[in-house]
Amino acid sequence: MNRPSSLPDVSDNDDEPQSRIAYRLIEAMIVTHELPPGSRISEASLSAKLGIGRTPIREALQRLSFEGTVKIVPRSGAFVSEIDLVDQLAMIEVRKGIENVLAGRAARFAGEVERKRFRELALMFEKSAARNDGHIFVEADREFNSLIVATARNKYAAQAITPIEAQTRRFWYVHFKQFGDLQRVCTLHAFVARRIAENDEARAREGSDKIVDYAEEYTRKTLMFFGMG
């Protein structure tokens, strides 16, 4: 595929549907503001840029619309949704309960393969903190979230958390460097990854709550800065 270098390295995989690849690439463009809020999305342009057919692009946009990242307007097309700062606190309130359930279940059901990968992700978070490298954190966090959902084996919690995580990633990219603490958030994530790897359900839940509590803390800092707190 002819993808620009600014997009994440998503290798071609015959087992991965084109629509899923398109979803991951388009979401990355939205999160990083290559497609900024309010901008119109051209299926034809994306198809040419990503080297993916228009049908998978359309399916990806439908999924992004479900998550609230894209708004599809009849007879007008698709647009990148604006980031609602105030709405972040409402999402955090819901997010805490769902992620607590997911972290606990992931710790309960994680087998040897999952435990090994969670230990590796903990090392990635610690590496990110040591190097103060947000790119490593973003890469590790995306897989961390996906692996927790997969390991937890609860489709209802998975469906509920997906749109929340999508909006959280956009908010994080725009505001975290100014208002967040990378070392702290990496330490919190590494703690949960290690507790899941140890099948320690109670402490995985506890660590999950601390991650969301911290997310609320820096979200409130952001809102106060913009006079919304």
Image: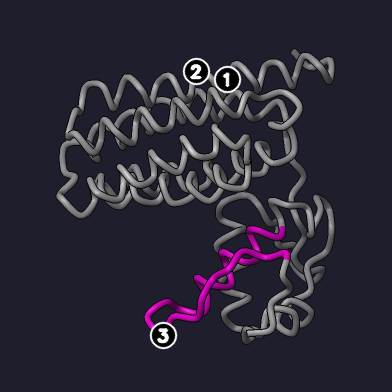
Task: State which quarter of the image contains the C terminus.
Answer: top right
Nearest the eye: 91 or 32: 32
In the image, 148 versus 199, the foreground residue is: 199
Q: Residues within 10 Å of mark 1 (few under 14, many from 20)?
A: some
The residue that label 1 is drawn on is 216
How is the rendered protein coloured? Answer: one colour
Residue at the image point whose x is 66% and y is 25% from the top: 180
Q: Look at the image and say whether residue 7 sits in the magenta stretch.
A: yes
Disc 3 residue type (three-letter): Asp
Which residue lies at the image location 60% right of the left edge and 29% below the top edge? 182
Marks 2 and 3, Cα distance to the nearest angstrom?
40 Å
Quarter occupied by the N terminus: bottom right
Numbered label attached to residue 175: none
Magenta range:
6-29
Task: Kindly indicate the quadrant of the structure image that contains residue 79.
Answer: bottom right
* Alpha carbons under labels 1 and 2: distance apart: 5 Å
